[in-house]
């Protein structure tokens, strides 16, 4: 079997006849909100705004859903990724608690939205199990105690319970409920379709070259036209060239993924339970989950962004590395081959949390940048926060993701 490198299985396996096809933007128009970026975040924001009755236009420089969020592992997790204690050190206990509670609600709200819209994206409930390694017990227990003291929903797992859940011999672990797995590309396609049905105007192959603004006007300049708007939402993953001063807040990183061939029933018994997502505490961590077709997705091997000329060879090496590391965790998979190996870029922030909301230097802009590699929950949470901002009804908890936190 030949491995497909550089190809997201979510996009590759989606029927070509059902793939959305939107026009290129041309001309000069006036609208309410312009969204830059047609990934999962941009599409979630478009759906939320259109449903609320706002006049919305979304511009994607490539194709809808071809960005990093639809090249993810397809996890909608209740946990933002960084340790709670590190976030407390960075932004304080109150805001850290708000951030983690908001993220969990974001996961639940996202699942409820996808069900309400009847978007068929293989949405399945999952529980996140984080397993400690030998020698990590003291720090791991401190993390658990900090979360428990803050009132966060987390359950302690004994070695026997960890073994029963994920078939690993780990000294201790924790379980966080209210997570999900999904096909992120199908979710993205469903959201943008829902936005269009509500009146949002969607455009592909429409790169924004400049955003010109003053106190009274805002002009979004695209390759073939201009849009006069009242607000612009930047949902491009990380700060683009147009917002160069903001780039210092992000480190460009890559995460790698492997989708295996189907796993035999006899082998599946020696692997994690189907409704459990495994995350370990290695640096960088592994994330392991099942798909509906009895395949495993393994994500990890995060590193700083590699030069374009090296990316192909690095991808092959990282795919092999992930399969080897999975084998060391679960020897029963010996002989299992990777069908897909792909990467995704993301902007890592200093504290591991997204920046969502306005920035004082850009008074007519709203941002949703820095979506972490662990899951796509931030895309749905951003939609909620940004809609509140556009309606002039921010929540105090939104401060945890602000530029001034």
Image: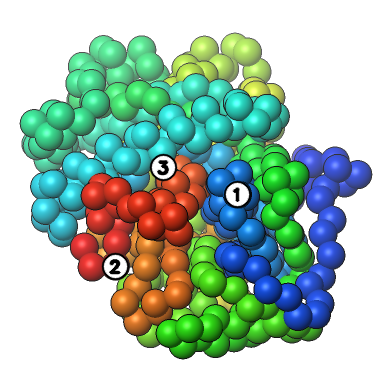
Q: Which residue is mark 1?
A: 53
Q: Residue at x 50, y 22 (%)?
A: 125
Q: Mark 3 to mark 1: distance in Å?
A: 41 Å
| Nearer the camera: disc 3 or disc 1 | 1
User: Pointer 3 and pointer 2: residues touching (CB < 8 Å)?
Assistant: no
For marks 3 and 2, the one nearer the N-term is 3
Q: Residue at x 46, y 33 (%)?
A: 109
* Mark 2 or mark 1: whose residue is earlier in sequence: 1
Label 3 or label 2, whichever lies nearer to me, is 2
The residue to which callout 2 is attached is: 403
Q: Residues within 10 Å of mark 1 (few under 14, many from 20)?
A: few
Tell me if I can see residue 43 in this picture.
yes
Q: Say what secondary structure mark 2 lies in.
A: loop
When the figure is inspected, residue 252 is found, relative to residue 7, above or below; the finding is below
Measure the alpha-carbon separation of dots 3 and 2: 29 Å
Query: How is the model colour-coded?
Result: rainbow
Q: Position of residue 255 (x, y in %)?
A: 49, 56
Q: Secondary structure at mark 3?
A: loop
Question: Could you tell me if residue 207 is visible in this image?
Answer: no
Query: How dense is the environment of label 3, judged by Cα within 10 Å: few (below 14), some, or many (20 and up)?
Result: many
Q: Which mark is residue 286?
A: 3
């Amino acid at each position: 079997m030949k491995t497909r490198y550089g190809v997201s299985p979510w996009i590759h396996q989606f029927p070509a006849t059902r793939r959305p096809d939107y026009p290129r933007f041309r001309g000069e128009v006036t609208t309410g909100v312009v969204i830059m970026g047609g990934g999962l975040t941009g599409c979630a924001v478009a759906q939320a705004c259109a449903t609320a009755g706002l006049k919305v236009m979304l511009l994607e420089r490539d194709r809808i859903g071809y960005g990093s969020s639809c090249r993810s592992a397809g996890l909608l997790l209740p946990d933002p990724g960084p340790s709670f204690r590190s976030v407390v050190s960075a932004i304080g206990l109150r805001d850290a608690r708000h951030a983690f509670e908001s993220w969990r609600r974001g996961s639940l709200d996202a699942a409820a939205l996808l069900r309400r819209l009847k978007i068929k994206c293989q949405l399945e409930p999952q529980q996140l199990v984080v397993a400690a390694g030998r020698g990590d017990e003291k720090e791991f227990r401190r993390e658990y105690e900090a979360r428990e003291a803050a009132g966060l929903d987390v359950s302690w797992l004994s070695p026997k319970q960890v073994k029963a859940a994920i078939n690993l011999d780990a000294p201790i672990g924790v379980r966080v409920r209210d997570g999900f797995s999904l096909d992120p590309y199908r979710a993205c396609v469903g959201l943008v379709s829902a936005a269009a049905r509500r009146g949002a105007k969607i455009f592909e192959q429409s790169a924004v070259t400049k955003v010109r603004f003053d106190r009274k006007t805002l002009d979004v300049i695209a390759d073939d036209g201009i849009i006069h708007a009242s607000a612009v939402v930047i949902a491009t993953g990380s700060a683009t060239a147009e917002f160069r001063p903001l780039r210092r807040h992000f480190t460009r990183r890559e995460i790698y993924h492997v989708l295996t061939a189907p796993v035999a029933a006899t082998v599946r018994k020696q692997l994690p339970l189907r409704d459990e997502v495994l995350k370990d505490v290695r640096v960088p961590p592994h994330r392991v989950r099942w798909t509906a077709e009895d395949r495993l997705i393994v994500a990890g091997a995060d590193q700083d962004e590699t030069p374009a000329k090296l990316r192909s060879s690095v991808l092959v090496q990282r795919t092999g590395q992930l399969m080897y590391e999975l084998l060391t965790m679960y020897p029963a998979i010996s002989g299992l081959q990777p069908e897909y190996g792909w990467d995704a870029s993301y902007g890592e922030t200093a504290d591991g949390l997204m920046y969502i909301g306005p920035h004082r230097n850009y008074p007519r802009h709203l941002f949703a940048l820095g979506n972490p590699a662990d899951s796509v929950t931030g895309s749905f949470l951003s939609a909620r926060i940004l809609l509140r901002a556009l309606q002039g009804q921010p929540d105090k908890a939104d401060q945890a993701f602000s530029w001034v936190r």
